[in-house]
Amino acid sequence: MTTTTTTGPALRARRTDLAAALLSAALLGAAAPAMARFQADPVIAPPLDVALATPLALTAPVPAELRQAAADDIDAAGKAASAADEAPEGQDQAASAPASGSAAEPAVAGQAGAAAAAADAPAPGPRVRNRLDPWERWNRKVFNFNEKLDEHVLRPVATAYSDLVPQPARQAVDNFFGNFSDAWSAVNLFLQGRFKNGASQTMRVAVNSVFGIAGLIDIATPAGLEKTSEDLGRTLGYWGVKTGPYIVWPLLGPSSLRDSVTLPVNAYYSPAYLFDDGEYKFAITALQVINTRANLLRVTDMLDGIALDKYTFVRDAYLQRRNIKSHKEQQEDDDDDYEVITPDEKPVNPQGDR
């Protein structure tokens, strides 16, 4: 038996080749489970192949069985990637379902948190009523009724009246009713204690009644006698009676508690007061209503186009127009217009002490 003894450099070279072979086998053995785990992911598999191929190329020769096993693993990963690319959309959606479900869990949790916060929030309080309009629900129903009546009766009649009757004739009718209104305003100015304004209003009525042919022609306005409109409701307000809640009456329209009390008196002292016959009273009243509605055609048409809530607009405009300062408030305002100089105050000499 012949024994070959290897010493020196040859022995060290064989030990190095053996160590490299063992190291390569260990690397492939450790990489095999990783390759199987990443076969379903085509994005991660190619970089892993490159990472495994690089150390193998730099090391010593590897046995053929291990190289064939690595090649088979790489081919299997490529086939898995191709199958994933050719899979139908339904399978892709099914594969992405767990991810979407996990993403939906935080959204559901967020909705639950929002619902809990809403439950903890205090409940909204009752709707606050308008102090000047406590009967708004009822007033709106009556207002809608008046609107329907105006739409189907008053507006068509007033439009026909405006189209058929010439403008000078309509102006004469308006002046006639305005002259009666001026006479009632003069009475209320005297009741308010505003005698100067009452005398001026009385002069206006006299001029229009005598020289204006019973008020058909307005001569007082060009002569400088201005019109001041007052009624019994404003007279009560002048003496401190509050306006009270807002009320909408059928046919009569907007009013207030204070003005509603004075409606019979204001209606009694109207142009129909001159006639005893019921037919004439009705005809004069109907002519006054139609003429007044004809004068408001343009205003109501504009109001329909610009008002978001017509009821609120009419209510606020009425209450603002019917608001009048009481006698006491006017005296306080007049006192504020004057500066009171006490004896302790020394007047200022604009020229200085010289």
Image (cartoon, rainbow, N blue to C red):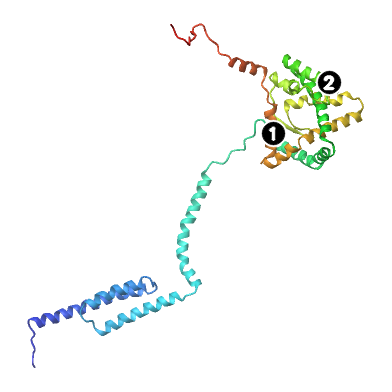
Relative to 153, does residue 319 appear above or below in the rendering? Answer: above
At 8% from the left edge and 85% from the top edge, which residue is drawn? Answer: 6
At 74% from the left edge and 18% from the top edge, which residue is drawn? Answer: 189
Callout 2–callout 1 Cβ contact below 8 Å: no
Question: What residue sits right under mark 1 in the picture?
Answer: 315
At 58% from the left edge and 14% from the top edge, which residue is drawn? Answer: 338
Relative to 64, does residue 187 appear above or below in the rendering? Answer: above
Q: Is residue 139 visible?
A: yes
Q: Residues within 10 Å of mark 1 (few under 14, many from 20)?
A: some
For marks 2 and 1 on the same chain, the one whose residue lies earlier in the sequence: 2
Relative to 157, does residue 94 appear above or below in the rendering? Answer: below
The nearer-to-camera label among 2 and 1 is: 2
Give SS at disc 1.
Answer: helix
Amino acid found under the numbered disc labelled 2: Phe
Question: What residue sits right under mark 2 in the picture?
Answer: 211
Left/right placement of residue 322 relative to residue 294 reads: left
Amino acid found under the numbered disc labelled 1: Arg
Tell me residue 8's x, y (percent).
7, 81
